[in-house]
């Protein structure tokens, strides 16, 4: 029996969102807890009554630990959870294949690898869905998820149909209001960013996290790198690389660890986190990531 479902703090990603929804629907009495991914209690990983999803650095189904970030060859947490608890391999479903690929290598690289053209409208549907309170609506989310998977093999259509189902069930009302307020807050933050040219890099420095809107920041500023407080721990600094920058092959964020203490490096290399605050971080040191 699962008594607790543990995953990382916001922002939610598609794989952990659906995995958590499925688990909450299956184990309705289980508590959902979100933790800093760098500080998952060891006792959580050792207790099979606690299901640890998308964090913890361990894939151990018997202990109900379902993380993939420690191994690029592992599938995303959604496939792990469904494979173990549902007993069905969804890895051949085209929609789930893209959910997996986007989570592991990013939407830009997934598009390049598969040739799939992602609709610009996806975020319109996906954003309110990922803000859904799974303590309230896990059953509706999970039932709608499987229903839409049976209706379409197309990733773009999946999000549109899924949104329409949840909207008809009045699941998204709170999410829409949250998004309205978040948009106001994002525009405020965007008006306060600093832009600096460091070598041939355009760097955006923000004193507040811009997550989960980095793609929009890159679109609107054409920056190569964003430096900001880590969304999981504001006493740490995140350095985020623009995956569509023309300089991407010359940007190695791991080199920043030669200057600042390492906290985390995403396995795709797009995100590095260092153990200093933004106030302590010398943005001119970003030049060190160029190779």
Image: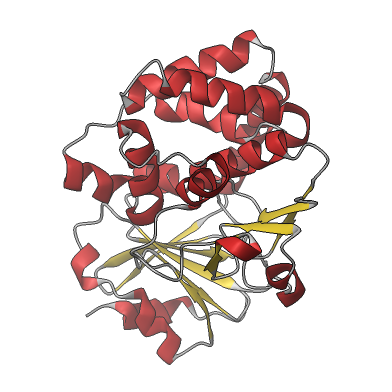
In percent of the image, x 56 and y 38: which residue is there? 18
> Residue 195 or 224: which is nearer the viewer?
224
In percent of the image, x 77 and y 50: which residue is there? 1
> Residue 49 or 287: which is nearer the viewer?
49
Residue at the outermost bottom position: 258
> Could you say where residue 198 lies in the image, as x and y percent from the top left?
33, 73
Left or right: residue 126 versus residue 173 is: left
In percent of the image, x 62 and y 37: which residue is there? 22
Which quarter shows the C terminus?
Answer: bottom left
In percent of the image, x 71 and y 72: which residue is there? 46
Q: Is residue 191 visible?
A: no
> Could you say where residue 254 lies in the image, as x and y percent from the top left?
37, 79
Please identify the quarter of the rendering in which residue 243 is found.
bottom left
> Could you say where residue 261 lies in the image, as x and y percent from the top left?
53, 87
Please identify the quarter of the rendering in which residue 57 is found.
bottom right
Left or right: residue 162 versus residue 95 is: right
């Amino acid at each position: 029996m699962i008594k607790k479902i543990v995953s990382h703090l916001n922002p939610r990603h598609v794989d952990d969102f659906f995995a958590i929804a499925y688990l909450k629907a299956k184990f309705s009495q289980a508590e959902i807890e979100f933790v800093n991914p760098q500080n998952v209690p060891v006792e959580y990983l050792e207790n099979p009554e606690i299901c640890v999803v998308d964090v913890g650095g361990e894939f151990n189904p018997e202990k109900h630990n379902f993380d993939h970030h420690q191994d690029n060859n592992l599938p995303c947490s959604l496939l792990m959870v469904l494979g173990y608890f549902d007993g069905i391999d969804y890895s051949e479903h085209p929609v789930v294949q893209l959910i997996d690929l986007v989570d592991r290598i990013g939407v830009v690289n997934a598009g390049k690898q598969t040739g799939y053209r992602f609709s610009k409208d996806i975020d319109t549907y996906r954003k309110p869905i990922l803000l859904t309170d799974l303590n309230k609506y896990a059953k509706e989310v999970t039932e709608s998820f499987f229903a839409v998977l049976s209706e379409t093999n197309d990733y773009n259509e999946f999000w549109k149909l899924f949104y329409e189902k949840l909207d008809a069930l009045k699941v998204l009302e709170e999410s829409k209001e949250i998004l309205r307020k978040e948009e106001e807050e994002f525009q405020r933050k965007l008006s306060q960013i600093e832009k600096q040219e460091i070598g041939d890099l355009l760097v955006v420095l923000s004193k507040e996290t811009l997550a989960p809107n980095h793609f929009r920041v890159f679109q609107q500023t054409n920056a190569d790198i964003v430096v900001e407080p880590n969304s999981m721990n504001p006493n740490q600094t995140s350095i985020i690389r623009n995956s569509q920058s023309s300089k991407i092959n010359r940007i190695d964020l791991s080199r920043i660890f030669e200057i600042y203490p390492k906290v985390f490096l995403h396995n795709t290399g797009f995100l590095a986190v260092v153990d200093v605050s933004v106030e302590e971080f010398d943005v001119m040191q970003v030049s060190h990531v160029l190779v």
